[in-house]
Image (cartoon, rainbow, N blue to C red):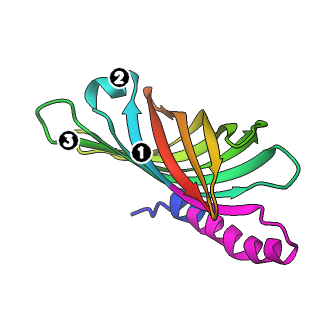
Amino acid sequence: MRKRSGIPAMITVLLAMVVVCRPVAAQLGIMPIHIGAAVGGAFPLSDFGNAFSTGFNVTGTIAVTPPLIPVGFRGDVVYNHFGSKGASNATAKIAGASANAIFGMPGVIITPYVIGGIGYYHVSSSLTGTTASNHFGFNAGAGLNVPLLVFKAFVEARYNHISESGGSTSFVPVTVGVMF
């Protein structure tokens, strides 16, 4: 049996970045490393949306935002869950990890941004005759950052497209989160 190590390896690398980089940034007086979490709805599109209903999304994130430049980088680990539209109790689950570029635009208090990148996704379904598989994909979207006293809140929507043999899966998570 082959062990799938792509997503756990990506999580390990992201956590290592925080453990190593965050103390160094604090000593230099800058804090370009931020960790966060988000939750929200996930809306299936196209053929995927014909079979499955709106689900939920949970996201963990690590962002590197260098001072004085508008471009940063963000690693996300995501889990999406969708229920069947039919009479069955079938579910679809999409877990993944993505590496993204984030471009912040000027704002007064609320700062808009665009985000996009590539990811590696594990797609599974409880439908009879389906098998779980891993695929590459991409995401692109936009959001708003709202600075608060100790952390910053954000809301974003991202189009996700996963290329699969014989087709693709697309969905849009709309999430609300916090960054520390």
Instruction: Estimate the x, y position of residue 52 in percent, counting from the top left.
Output: 28, 32
Residue 90: give its label.
Answer: 3
Left of 3 or right of it: where is 130?
Answer: left
Q: Which residues are magenta?
A: 11-37
Instruction: Estimate the x, y position of residue 93 in percent, counting from the top left.
Output: 35, 46
Distance CA(mark 1)–CA(mark 2): 22 Å
- Residue underneath mark 2: 47
Tell me the kind of residue under disc 1. Gly
- Residue underneath mark 1: 40
Which-is-in-front pick, marks 3 and 1?
1
Q: Quadrant of residue 30?
A: bottom right
Q: Is residue 70 magenta?
A: no
Residue 56: give its label.
Answer: none
User: Quick one: 160 or 124, which is closer to the camera?
Assistant: 160
Of callouts 2 and 3, which one flags the residue occurring earlier in the amino acid sequence?
2
Residue at 25% from the left image edge and 43% from the top image edge: 91
Pointer 1 local density, CA inside 10 Å: few below 14, some 14–19, many at least 20: some
